[in-house]
Amino acid sequence: MSGTFAHRARIDAAVDTVDVAAYTIPTDAPEADGTLDWHQTTIVIVAIEGGGRRGLGYSYVDASAATLIHGLLAGVVRGRSAMDVPAAWTAMVRAIRNVGRSGVASCAIAAVDAALWDLKSRLLDVPLASLLGASREGVEIYGSGGFTSYSIARLQEQLAAWVASGITRVKMKIGRDAHADVDRVQAAREAIGPTAELFVDANGAYDRKQALAVAEQIEPFGVTWFEEPVSSDDLEGLRLLRDRAPATIEIAAGEYGYDLRYFQRMLEAGAIDVLQATRRAARASRASFRLARSPTRSESRCRRTPRRRSTSRRAARSAASGTSSISMITFESSRCFSTGHRSPAQTDASIQICPGLGLASS
């Protein structure tokens, strides 16, 4: 019976403590994409305890998110049932009404939300995938890097190493110089061979005509994924690219969405082939769970088949129904540390714990 009582106690567990820390981790070299340069990455890590177990969550966001968690969100979730994660999420969203729903606040909520789900799965002694309910048996991955700050040699070395290790899809950054970008894509293809899939990400750096021209020029090198060819806020531009770019290239966007309405607008505009819901900003958390259960067709990359370019009849059907003929939805975790990075547990002097936040209980 002791086992039964212990299980009952875990089910009845409340959130006891909420600890938060922010870490700044230098990159192994300066990094850049089409619109931004950086030399370090900040990660906010949340640890929540209850019922004798501990759950972890994190988000890549400014250290100010840790201050928000420490001063506001921790008090919202402390004492609540560890089983009622959706209720905790709703309470946190209400609590940040005067702070602002998007940006830092959503990223802070995401870190706490992830820690709560992890705690619940540990209390119930089941994998998180089983707790949430799996949509498929496995998830294909891709290596993401190839920064615009890299030399051609460094670009080829990184992408080729990923393919050699068994990763059959790689993504590189473009957007700084349209002419040089085409040469870099060609060099990437030469490095990874003819069979690996090649993705590119412009981070919204191009205008519409530039993006369309680049899409046509990189198509001969087997690019199958063009992420944010224009700003994600330019839904008409994304739709233009989706309709007019080579049919073998899929248009991806959505990683800067913070709520379901953001994704709904993209779908209604027929703006993308691949809807990206990025976990680091809850931006996904609850939204991604609901998207995963939506009736929109979702496929893994390994089963993707080239789509046909929209015809007037197909476009008319989409307009009439108010839906997008989207090819798939992807759910991305925060980006991995680049080659040469170490995890927070392995890094020593290169990590700076934000003053006053070093895993101090809230």
Image: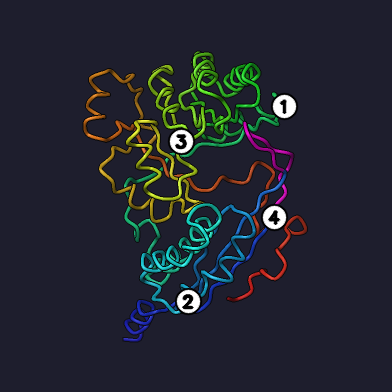
Which residue is identified by label 4? 24
Identify the residue at horizontal 51%, vertical 18% (top origin): 209
Q: Residue at x 34, y 58 (%)?
A: 132
Asked if residue 27 lies in the magenta stretch, the reply is: yes
Residue type marked 4: Thr
The residue singled out by tag 2 in the image is: 78
Q: Nearer the viewer, residue 265 or 356?
A: 265
- Is the residue marked by circle 2 packed among few (<14), some (14-19), or many (20+) residues within 10 Å? some
Which residue matches tag 3?
253
Residues under labels 4 and 1: Cα distance? 25 Å
Which mark is nearer the camera, 1 or 2?
A: 2
The reply to whether the C-beta atoms of the residues labelled 2 and 4 are less than 8 Å apart is: no
Q: Is residue 73 above or below residue 295?
A: below
Q: Position of residue 197 (x, y in %)?
A: 48, 26
| Three-letter code, disc 2 | Arg
Residue 123, horizontal then vertical, whole percent? 41, 72
Q: Nearer the viewer, mark 4 or mark 1?
A: 4
Looking at the image, is mark 2 or mark 3 earlier in the sequence?
Answer: 2
Q: Is residue 292 above or below residue 312?
A: below
Colour mapping used in the image: rainbow
- Marks 3/4: CA distance? 27 Å
Residue beneath label 1, please?
151
Secondary structure of the residue carrying tag 4 is: strand
Q: CA distance from mark 2 to mark 3?
A: 35 Å
Disc 2 from disc 4: Cα separation: 27 Å
Q: Residue at x 38, y 21 (%)?
A: 243
> What span is colored magenta in the figure?
24-38
In-image side of 296 versus 141 (left or right): left
